[in-house]
């Protein structure tokens, strides 16, 4: 049975054709903090060909210093950010884990950009942490079931 999720207003819904919840990571970078308005963003990298979205979406693109675009996809009505895509990894989408209907079952398997972590936040000791980002290869090694 596919996984499902939606925006706050319900106008934009998605299905995710995976056998179980995707592996999620917690990003503590300033961009994620600012964009989410929270201490951390919980995201799951999923194969884009297994993500089906219904409803009108808006898009905002951020271009980095190397000219690589990250495109944020939002519900056009309530502006809930559902996922993003990056030109450097066109076959993967970064799903906002809190939009999953079963988001209460998500637990990050890794934390990145921990050097930017809010000082009052305590991280679990049994979860992998990286002071900055981590390589795509390392994440895929951890999240391999998503891409099998």
Image (tube, helix red, strand yellow):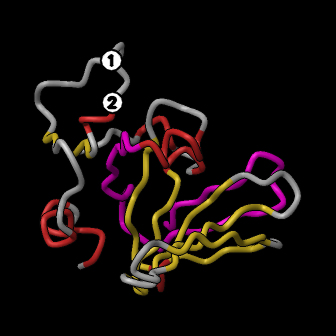
Magenta segment: 1-29
Residue on which disc 1 sits: 119
Task: Estimate the x, y position of residue 111 in percent, counting from the top left.
Answer: 25, 42
Residue 146 lies, with reference to residue 32, above or below; the image says below
Residue drawn at (33%, 38%), measured in percent from left and top?
A: 107
Left or right: residue 80 compared with residue 136: right
Residue drawn at (72%, 52%), measured in percent from left and top?
A: 80
Left or right: residue 17 compared with residue 99: left
Residue 29 lies, with reference to residue 4, above or below; the image says above
- Residue 10 located within the stretch drawn in magenta: yes
Image quadrant in which you'd find residue 114: top left
Which numbered marker is on residue 31?
none
Residue drawn at (22%, 48%), measured in percent from left and top?
A: 132
- Residue 17 located within the stretch drawn in magenta: yes
Residue on which disc 2 sits: 117
Task: Estimate the x, y position of residue 141 in percent, counting from the top left.
Answer: 12, 67
Image quadrant in which you'd find residue 87: bottom left
User: Does dot 2 land on a helix, a strand or a loop?
Assistant: loop
């Amino acid at each position: 049975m596919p996984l499902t999720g939606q925006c706050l207003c319900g106008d934009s819904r998605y299905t995710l054709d995976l056998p179980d919840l995707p592996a999620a990571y917690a990003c503590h970078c300033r961009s994620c903090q600012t964009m989410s308005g929270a201490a951390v963003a919980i995201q799951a990298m999923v194969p884009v060909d297994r993500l089906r979205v219904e409803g009108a979406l808006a898009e905002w693109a951020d271009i980095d210093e190397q000219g690589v675009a990250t495109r944020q996809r939002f519900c056009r009505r309530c502006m809930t950010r559902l996922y993003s895509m990056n030109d450097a990894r066109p076959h993967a989408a970064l799903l906002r884990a809190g939009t999953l209907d079963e988001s209460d079952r998500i637990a990050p398997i890794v934390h990145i950009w921990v050097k930017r972590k809010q000082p009052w936040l305590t991280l679990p000791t049994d979860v992998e942490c990286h002071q900055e980002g981590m390589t795509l290869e390392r994440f895929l090694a951890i999240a391999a079931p998503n891409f099998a």
